[in-house]
Image (tube, helix red, strand yellow):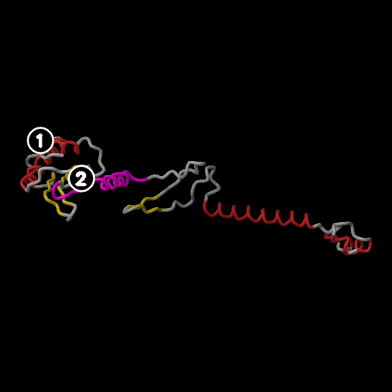
Amino acid sequence: ANRGIAKGRTPTPAMAHHYSSMGPFAVAEVPSRRQRSHILTSIVSVLLIAGASLFAVQHYDLASPFMTKALAPKTQIGSMQRSVSASACSFGRGINERISKRDRRIRRKMGLRKKISGTPEKPRLSVFRSNKHIYGQIIDDTIGHTIAAAGTVEKGVKGDLAEKTPKEQAEIVGKLLAERAKAKGVEKVVFDRNGYKYHGRVASIADGAREVGLAF
């Protein structure tokens, strides 16, 4: 009888009577080896699906139709931190990363600084602008020394900048910076736009420096 049950055949009448006495848990036939393998595979599949569902619940807001990210991770790139937020889970297109305008400028600046460097023979003319003012520096990067500098915040320059447009103010600053650089013996520079677009006040300060005779 035991051998018959092991091979998946119908039990003997005595064994059937024993199983019938078990009530709702009665077993008419012992599963074969192949059936047991299928049952085990099904159990493993159910566990894998349950684990994947638990992971999705912990990391995504499944109540949203677009599966929006519940918590946006923070990533550090170089010297700046940015908050990466996903408005929607785009299939096959990655996460929609949103960074600030300032961080984008710093990215461009660091890319330019890999190619531009000031030397004693040809220092770097670096420009910085804010909403109201603009500044220029001529820097020797080999020793980290500022050879000359000028800006719209200087007391001696504010009188000349009265009633001038922002571009005209930047051109005056460029001329003053070039005069101070030539007084220090600087004739050639490499222009560093510092991540800004070369237009408007940034281009005007470069034009003013060229008018005085600074070559770049």
Comes first in the chain, label 1 or label 2: 2
What residue do we see at 63% from left, 54% from top? Answer: 48
Q: Say whether residue 80 is magenta.
A: no
Q: Position of residue 140 (x, y in %)?
A: 16, 51
Quadrant occupied by the C terminus: top left
* Three-letter residue code for mark 2: Phe
User: Tag on residue 128?
Assistant: 2
Horizontally, residue 18 falls left or right of residue 128, namely right
Name the mark nearer the viewer: 1 or 2.
1
Quadrant occupied by the N terminus: bottom right
- CA gap between label 1 and label 2 equals 20 Å
Q: Quadrant of residue 18?
A: bottom right
Horizontally, residue 206 falls left or right of residue 17, namely left
The secondary element bearing badge 2 is classed as strand
Q: Which residues are magenta?
A: 99-121
Q: Write down the residue under mark 1.
A: 211
Q: Position of residue 176 (x, y in %)?
A: 9, 42
User: Tag on residue 126?
Assistant: none
* Three-letter residue code for mark 1: Glu
What residue do we see at 49% from left, 49% from top? Answer: 69
Q: Position of residue 137 (x, y in %)?
A: 15, 47
The secondary element bearing badge 1 is classed as helix
Q: Say whether residue 112 is magenta.
A: yes
The reply to whether discs 1 and 2 touch (Cβ–Cβ < 8 Å) is no
* Label 1 CA crowd tier, 10 Å (few <14, some 14–19, many 20+): few
Horizontally, residue 152 falls left or right of residue 24, namely left
What residue do we see at 7% from left, 39% from top? Answer: 160
